[in-house]
Amino acid sequence: METGHKLQMRFWGVRGSTPAPGKDTLVYGGNTPCVEIRTASNQVLIFDGGSGIRALGQHLATEFAGRELSLNLFLTHFHWDHIQGIPYFQPLFSPSTRLNVHSWTSDQQTRRVLEAQMNIPNFPLNLADAGARTSFAQLKSERVKIGDVSVESFPLNHPQGAYGYRIEADGKSIVYATDLEHGDGHLDQILRDHAAGADVLIYDAQYNDEEYASHRGWGHSTWREATSVARDADVGKLFLFHFDPAHTDARVAESERLAAAEFDEACAAREGLVVLL
Ligand SMILES: [Zn+2]
Ligand SMILES: [Zn+2]
C-alpha cells in the first residue's frame, strides 16, 4: 500500500468468460476477473477469483511471508470465470491464512460450489485439506464493515444472478459492477443509485452495439451503456471491464477510444494497473 491514500486498487484479471492468453491480448491481459482493493490500514479485499487471482496469490505469499494473512474475498457470482483461479491461489494452502468468503447465497451453498470445482477428478486436493482457515459469510442488505472499509452489495441483471459492490473508505468509493445486462429498468436504477458519485466505476463492457444485438440475454453489456451509467451516476472515472475473450488489444483500444469520446474519464481496465484514491 502506498502511503497517503484511502484506497488502492489493482486489476489482476479483466477478461470475461474464459482466459485468453496470447500475443493479441498482451496489453490488456488475458486473465479472468480479479480485483484487489487495499485500505489505509492495509485490509486486503479481493473481488472475484478468476484466473487473475493466481498471480495475486503469489504476490501476497511473498509480501506476507512468515506473517498472518487475513483476506476477505467477495464473489459476484459462481460462473466459472469468477471462481476458476481459487484452486491455484497460493495463500489457500497456508495455515497462516484466514480467508473469509462473502457471497449472497448461504454459507453452505458457497462452500459446496467452491468444494465442487476441487473435487476428484477435477483437482488433486480438496478445499477442506488446503490448509487455510476458510470461512463463509452470506451477504445481507446491510453493509459489511471490515476495519476501515465498508462494502455494500446490490443485485445485477445476469443469468442465475450476480451482485455488484460499492466499497467505501474515508469518503472514497469504488463500484464494481461486472456481469450485468442493461435493460431491466428496476435493476438499472439500483445500479445507478449505488454508483452515484463514486470515484471509480468498473463496468461490464463485453460487447459493442452490433455484438450486443446478437447476444441479448447472455448477461453482458456494452461500452456505450457503460458511458451512459457513468454519466447518469456522475462517477469520477469509468473502467471498461470483462472484455470478450475474442477481442484483441486493438479491439479493446477501439472500445476505449469510442467510450472516451462519450465520457472523458473512460478507459479500459488492464492487468497490473494500479489506481490510487
Ligand atoms: Zn463473467
Ligand atoms: Zn457471469
Image: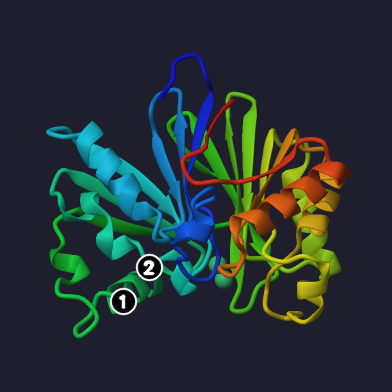
Question: Of 117 and 272, which appears nearest the observer?
Answer: 272
| Label 2 beta carbon less than 8 Å to ligand 1 | no
In this rendering, position of residue 263 left or right of residue 135: right
Farthest residue toward the bottom? 121
In this rendering, position of residue 181 left or right of residue 177: right
Mark drawn on residue 84: 2
Quadrant of res 230: top right
Q: Earlier in the sequence, mark 2 or mark 1?
A: 2
Indicate the quadrant containing the N terminus: top left, top right, bottom left or bottom right: top left
The image shows residue 46 at horizontal and vertical percentages of 43, 47
- The answer to whether residue 204 shows anywhere in this view is no
Q: Secondary structure at mark 1?
A: loop
Quadrant of res 41: top left
The image shows residue 139 at horizontal and vertical percentages of 51, 58
On screen, residue 154 above or below 126: above
Task: Characterize the local packing of mark 2: few (<14), some (14-19) or many (20 or more) Cα atoms within 10 angstroms.
Answer: many
Task: Characterize the local packing of mark 1: few (<14), some (14-19) or many (20 or more) Cα atoms within 10 angstroms.
Answer: some
The image shows residue 161 at horizontal and vertical percentages of 61, 73
On screen, residue 44 above or below 244: above
Viewer-side label of 2, 1: 2
| Label 1 beta carbon less than 8 Å to ligand 2 | no
Q: Are marks 2 and 1 in contact (CB under 8 Å)?
A: yes
User: Mark 2 belongs to which amino acid?
Assistant: Gln
On screen, residue 87 above or below 237: below
In this rendering, position of residue 121 left or right of residue 262: left
User: Mark 1 belongs to which amino acid?
Assistant: Gln
